[in-house]
Image (cartoon, grey):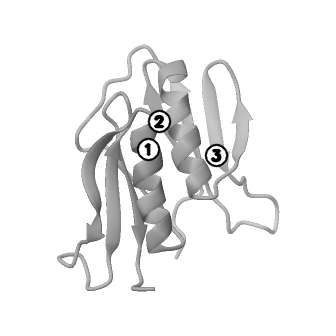
């Protein structure tokens, strides 16, 4: 099951957060779909009879407040991509929320890394295989 079609999150200062999202989404192979003054979007939008895609939008909202329970997990294509997600996000202004590594308490092959965006929203990249 591929449950999510699209997802939107909010930040107070999009210009400060955009470099982070552009870096981590590029590493995961999610192209920039649109860029406006108040929003950016990544991934691939679904079309009629072609609905196996998903995308993430990041909207600017002055009232946005980070919530430690907000957690967006993105699929990676390899362990190397999880590691590149973490390194790229740190280089683009994110902060560490969990270094790349196995999380066997989820399942034996769960390999993930966690980051906070510049405003404190938590993102994860996960790969569900050993190779």
Task: Classify 103 as above or below 9.
Answer: below
* Relative side of 39 to 112, left or right: right
Task: Classify 73 as above or below 62.
Answer: below
* Relative side of 125 to 26, left or right: left
Kindly report the distance in space between the C-alpha atoms of the residues bearing marks 2 and 3.
17 Å
Task: Classify 108 as above or below 64.
Answer: below
Image coordinates of residue 102 in percent, x first then y, are 26, 74
Residue at image point 40% right, 79% down? 128
Q: Which mark is residue 92?
A: 2
Residue at image point 44% right, 26% down? 11
Q: Quadrant of the C terminus?
A: bottom left
Kindly report the distance in space between the C-alpha atoms of the residues bearing marks 3 and 1.
15 Å
| Foreground disc of the pair 3, 1 | 1
Image coordinates of residue 67 in percent, x first then y, are 26, 35
* Sequence-first tag of 3 and 1: 3
Q: Circles 1 and 2: CB distance less than 8 Å? A: yes
Residue at image point 34% right, 65% down? 112
| Label 2 element class | loop
Q: Residues within 10 Å of mark 2 (few under 14, many from 20)?
A: some
Q: Is residue 75 visible?
A: no
| Label 3 element class | strand
Task: Classify 64 as above or below 55.
Answer: above
Q: Is residue 63 visible?
A: yes
Q: Which residue in the structure is indicated by mark 3?
A: 42
| Label 1 element class | helix
Q: Which residue in the structure is indicated by mark 1?
A: 89
Q: Which mark is residue 67?
A: none
């Amino acid at each position: 099951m591929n449950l999510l079609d699209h997802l939107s999150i909010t930040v107070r200062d999009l210009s400060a957060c955009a470099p982070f999202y552009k870096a981590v989404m590029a590493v995961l192979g999610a192209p920039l779909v649109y860029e406006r003054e108040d929003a950016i979007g990544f991934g691939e939008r679904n079309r009629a009879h072609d609905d196996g895609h998903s995308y993430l939008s990041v909207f600017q909202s002055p009232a946005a407040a980070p919530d430690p329970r907000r957690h967006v997990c993105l699929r990676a294509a390899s362990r190397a991509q999880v590691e590149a997600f973490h390194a790229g996000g740190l280089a683009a202004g994110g902060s560490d929320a969990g270094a790349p590594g196995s999380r066997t308490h989820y399942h034996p092959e769960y390999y993930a890394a966690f980051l906070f965006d510049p405003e404190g929203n938590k993102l994860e990249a996960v790969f569900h295989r050993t190779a």
